[in-house]
Image: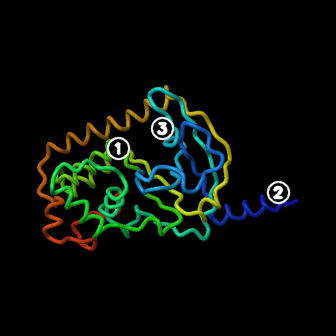
Amino acid sequence: LFRSIALRVMRSCREMGHIITLFHGSEKVVEVPTFGVGKKTNDFGLGFYCTESEGLAKEWAVSSLRDGFCNRYTLDTEYLNILNLNSPDYTILNWIAVLVEHRLFSIKTPVARRAKRYLIDNFGINVNAYDLITGYRADDSYFDYAESFLNNGISVEQLARAMQLGKLGEQIVLKSKFAFSRIQFEGFDVAEKEEFYILRKARDDEANGLYLEMLEEESDGLYIQDIIRGGITNDDSRIPRNISE
């Protein structure tokens, strides 16, 4: 009886659009995602990182040496406080500011040190105030672009274009205990390295090739040093908004 009621409730939530299917790529099966476990140096800090793309989850699950697992879940998003960094409410520098606050960047110059502080102070977002975060995943190549921007190597316009070069993956991150209480394990598939590592590498290689071509073009846009010197903030029309297509 209780199972029948639960299934009816779940079906009703799906019809109202509250239930989404998520995938988590990993080297192991994760039946019970645990709040407070993981790396603080991930893109958006501590959390459980998923995607709505089964293919991307399988790419993220494998390495060149081993297969992985694509864990499947349903999540009830009703009543969750959600931050969508890909919405027009935010600029590309909001995303970068969140990255530099959590990820370990190579700070090569005094400009980069000032840039990190400026971005966090003027474009930072308290991601821990949200239950769920949607935003792009900084795979290796895209992390390099962000690092180049931080070190005054590319302009903010070039950075925005670089984010569009490959098929940048969108991730959904559970941040709060409340969010963790609303996710349910549904099963898993094996992700084979022979198929999905090749796809992952091809995506990265394509993005890097296009990025190198872009660097050959002249750019008179805003560099991080210009942004700092000009006291530019999030409402400046020269800062690209919404890095999604």
> Given contact means CB atoms under 8 Å apart, are the residues at marks 2 and 3 in contact?
no
Query: Where residue 109 sits in the image (x, y, percent)?
Result: 16, 52
Q: Which residue is drawn at 31% across and 51% down?
A: 163
Residue bearing mark 2: 3
Quadrant for the C terminus, please: bottom left
Q: Residue at x 16, y 58 (%)?
A: 223
Pointer 1 local density, CA inside 10 Å: few below 14, some 14–19, many at least 20 = some
In the current view of this chain or complex, which residue is farthest to the right? 1
Instruction: Between residue 205 and residue 95, name the one nearer to us.
Output: 95
Could you tell which of marks 2 and 1 lies nearer the N-terminus?
2
Instruction: Between residue 160 and residue 15, name the one nearer to us.
Output: 160
Res. 50 mark? none
Residue bearing mark 1: 166
* Left/right of residue 89 with respect to residue 133 in the rendered view: left
Location of residue 62 with respect to 174 vertically, above or below: above
Pointer 3 local density, CA inside 10 Å: few below 14, some 14–19, many at least 20 = many
Could you tell which of marks 3 and 1 lies nearer the N-terminus?
3
Residue bearing mark 3: 59
> Given contact means CB atoms under 8 Å apart, are the residues at marks 2 and 1 in contact?
no
Helix or strand or loop: what does disc 1 sit on?
loop
Badge 1 amino acid? Gly
